């Protein structure tokens, strides 16, 4: 069973989303991977995409199932009509604490939900309804003294157990952050080009996890370890086609290339340098800046100096110009 639903009884909507809510049904869906996500970090010339983003967008998958559940609640109730609203990151619903209160799991020290049945691999959604449903018991915290998720974080994003500094989180930096990524985080990012699964993957409770059987969430073969050179060569149309229907597409082509170029700079693969040189003329400063940084790590001093002579004179963006200066001083 890949889907489970538990109920949290509420006499009032805690977020004022809907005044008539009496119960919240929290739904979890297993997206457990078929292999250890940490293994891909060793393939330095391949990009690592977070497990959740290797196929269809889970928001679309879950929303359809939640609407079916909401309709079933209405049809199964002797009272008509039944009102229900579904949420999958479509409103400020605090899914993780609500899921813990409903008994789906508990919030681990990495701040994500942990399930005794599915480990750290659960998507969450909610059905708010005016039905008065019997509540399930909340789940207790079972992390104990373990701190594996805290210690593995490449950027030291955890200030303390249960406290995440999102500004240091690789998932935030590669997905939500729209600007240049600070130099201190680039090497720790490694070959992660969209998200990070380290704190999830290392959780000991994953020994009870199972591989997801939801076909729309099964990893596509071409997204499990895509070659960085191939990804860096994608133009915008090819990028949109390759990632159509999935979460990666939403960050846009420029931010995607930013991430890929950081991974190339960390790869140590000098054969990728010509592809990066081609990105020095990209319209976006995000891309040009990270191309400079990557070439500073891949090229010998003479080659890099020659590239600088060609490109710095016509660079109009101060941030990119600073990348050239910093790389030349390194």
Image (cartoon, rainbow, N blue to C red):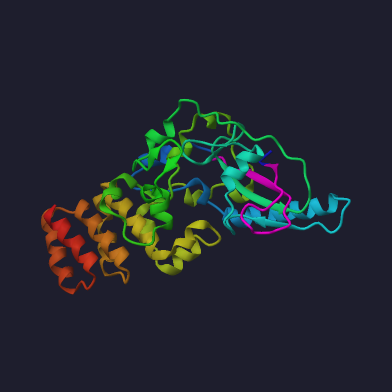
Q: Which residue occupies 85% across, 49% down?
A: 76
Give the side of residue 222 with respect to residue 18, left or right: left
For the image, the number of numbered tags is 0
Q: Is residue 193 magenta?
A: no
Q: Residue at x 78, y 47 (%)?
A: 132
- Residue 238 image-quadrant placement: bottom left
- What is the x, y in percent for residue 196? 43, 45
Q: Position of residue 179 (x, y in %)?
A: 34, 62
Q: With respect to residue 310, does 243 lie above or below?
A: above
Q: Quadrant of residue 120?
A: top right
Locate the N terminus and report the quarter of the image it occupies: top right
Nearer to me, 19 or 291: 19
**Which residues are the magenta region?**
4-33
Q: Which percent across, then down, holds residue 178?
A: 38, 62
Q: Is residue 229 above or below residue 32?
A: below
* Residue 103 lies in quadrant: top right
Q: Is residue 20 shown in magenta?
A: yes
Query: Going by the image, does 120 lie left or right of 313?
Result: right
- Using the image as rendered, state which of residue 167 and residue 15 is in the foreground: 15
């Amino acid at each position: 069973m890949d889907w489970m639903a538990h109920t949290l009884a509420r006499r009032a909507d805690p977020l004022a989303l809907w005044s008539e809510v009496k119960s919240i049904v929290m739904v979890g869906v297993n997206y457990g991977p078929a292999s250890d996500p940490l293994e891909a970090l060793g393939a330095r010339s391949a990009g690592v995409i977070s497990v959740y983003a290797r196929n269809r967008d889970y928001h679309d998958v879950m929303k359809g199932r939640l609407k079916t559940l909401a309709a079933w609640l209405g049809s199964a109730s002797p009272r008509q009509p039944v009102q229900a609203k579904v949420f999958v990151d479509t409103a400020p619903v605090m899914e993780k604490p609500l899921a813990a209160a409903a008994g789906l799991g508990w919030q681990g020290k990495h701040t994500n939900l942990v399930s005794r049945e599915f480990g750290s691999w659960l998507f969450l959604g909610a059905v708010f309804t005016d039905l008065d449903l019997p509540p399930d018991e909340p789940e207790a915290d079972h992390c104990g003294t373990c701190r594996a998720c805290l210690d593995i974080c490449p950027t030291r994003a955890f200030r303390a157990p249960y406290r995440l500094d999102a500004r240091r989180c690789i998932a935030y930096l590669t997905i939500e952050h729209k600007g240049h990524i600070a130099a201190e985080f680039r090497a720790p990012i490694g070959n992660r080009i969209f998200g990070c699964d380290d704190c999830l993957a290392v959780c000991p409770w994953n020994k009870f996890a199972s591989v997801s059987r939801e076909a729309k969430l099964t990893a596509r073969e071409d997204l499990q370890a895509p070659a960085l050179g191939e990804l860096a060569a994608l133009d915008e149309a090819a990028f949109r086609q390759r990632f159509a229907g999935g979460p990666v597409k939403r960050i846009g082509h420029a931010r995607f290339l930013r991430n890929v170029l950081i991974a190339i700079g960390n790869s140590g693969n000098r054969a990728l340098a010509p592809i990066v040189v081609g990105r020095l003329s990209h319209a976006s400063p995000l891309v040009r800046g990270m191309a400079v940084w990557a070439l500073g790590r891949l090229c010998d001093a003479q080659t890099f100096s020659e590239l600088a002579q060609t490109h710095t004179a016509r660079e109009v963006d101060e941030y990119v110009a600073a990348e050239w200066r910093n790389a030349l001083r390194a």
